[in-house]
Amino acid sequence: MGEWLAEHPTWHLEEGHLIREIDTVDYPSSVTLVESQVALAEELDHHPIITIGYRHLRFELWTHDRGGLTHLDLDYAKGLDALLSGEFAAFVR
């Protein structure tokens, strides 16, 4: 996991969960980003815990039924990174 985290420095571990926190330009951007990840979550059949605050998002990943991290968490994280560095890059501070 250490190697993966080194390659994906926007993510970190907290109590065995993979976490990414994002500051956005405004609240509507936060909501739009959450909506944009729905297709990814449905495609993988893997759904993150998302906390929405004013201009702040927190994505928390772990595979509940496996009691830890799996390839699904890493696949979701990579997909979210692609969204955030692509068409939604202007939403992120």
Image (cartoon, helix red, strand yellow):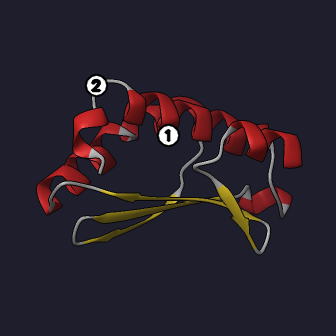
Q: Check disc 2: other Cα within 10 Å, few if <14, some if 14-19, many if 20+.
A: few
82 sits to left or right of 33? right
Q: Is residue 85 above or below residue 15?
A: above
Q: Quadrant of residue 70?
A: top right
The residue at 39%/40% (across/down) is 37
How far across and how far down the image is residue 49, in percent? 51, 63
Q: Which three-letter amino acid code belongs to the residue tagged 1?
A: Ala
Is residue 46 visible to the viewer in this orientation of the structure? Answer: yes
The residue that disc 2 covers is: 87
The residue that disc 1 covers is: 41
Q: Which three-letter amino acid code belongs to the residue tagged 2?
A: Glu
Number of marks present in the image shown: 2
How far across and how far down the image is residue 44, in percent? 59, 33
Q: Is residue 54 above or below residue 23?
A: below
Determine the secondary structure under disc 2.
loop
Q: Is residue 18 above or below residue 40?
A: below
The numbered mark at residue 13 is none
The residue at 39%/36% (across/down) is 84
